[in-house]
Image (cartoon, rainbow, N blue to C red):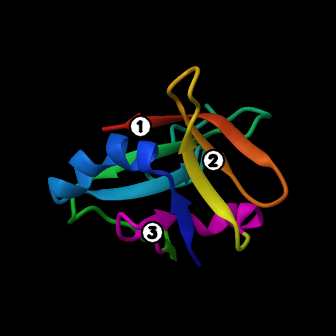
């Protein structure tokens, strides 16, 4: 599976890749080691989590190929996957936008360091 990362989004994320970090495209659903218990809501909220290369990624079994390398993705969020995943920057807000061929999934993807 592949995710297309726009040039503008790549600029925002490249410094982390250059520093040897791994990038997780995380659905904040209250499950897994990077989610706080009880903080999930009735909305779809994704975030990019920047982690050390030695971090435990057992919850992130899906590997998305990108022009930045592998982006790790949670198995529990597979319903959002299709062949046209995109991560781009909203020109007005400068926030990351995550979409697939069917829908705009999240228009304010935060980067968590």
How many numbered circles does the render carry? 3
Q: Nearer the viewer, residue 8 or 33?
A: 8
Q: Secondary structure at mark 3?
A: loop
Is residue 1 placed above or below 17 in the rendered structure? below
User: Is any part of residue 34 visible from this angle?
Assistant: no
Magenta stretch: includes residue 73: yes
User: Is any part of residue 24 visible from this angle?
Assistant: yes
Q: Residues within 10 Å of mark 2 (few under 14, many from 20)?
A: many
In the displayed structure image, the side of residue 65 where residue 68 appears, left or right: left
The location of residue 25, given as percent across then percent down, is 50, 54
Residue identifier under label 3: 66
Magenta stretch: includes residue 68: yes
Residue identifier under label 2: 98
Mark 3 or 1 closer to N-term? 3
In the displayed structure image, the side of residue 44 where residue 11 appears, left or right: left
Q: Secondary structure at mark 2?
A: strand
The location of residue 51, given as percent across then percent down, is 29, 52
Task: Please report contact status of discs 3 and 1: CB closer than 8 Å, yes or no.
Answer: no
Return the residue found at the far top.
92
> Residue 111, labelled with which disc?
1
* Real-space CA distance between mark 2 and mark 3, rounded to the nearest whole angstrom: 14 Å
Q: Nearer the viewer, residue 70 or 27?
A: 70
Asked which quadrant contains residue 108, the reply is top right
The location of residue 85, given as percent across then percent down, is 65, 62
């Amino acid at each position: 599976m592949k995710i297309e990362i726009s040039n503008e989004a790549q600029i925002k994320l490249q410094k982390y890749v250059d520093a040897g970090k791994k990038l997780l495209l995380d659905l904040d659903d209250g499950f897994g080691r990077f989610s706080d218990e009880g903080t999930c809501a009735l909305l779809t909220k994704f975030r990019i989590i920047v982690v050390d290369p030695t971090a435990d990624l057992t919850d992130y079994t899906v590997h998305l190929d990108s022009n930045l390398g592998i982006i790790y993705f949670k198995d529990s969020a597979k319903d959002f996957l299709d062949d046209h995943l995109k991560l781009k920057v909203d020109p007005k807000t400068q926030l990351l936008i995550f979409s697939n061929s069917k829908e705009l999934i999240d228009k304010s993807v935060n980067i968590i360091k």
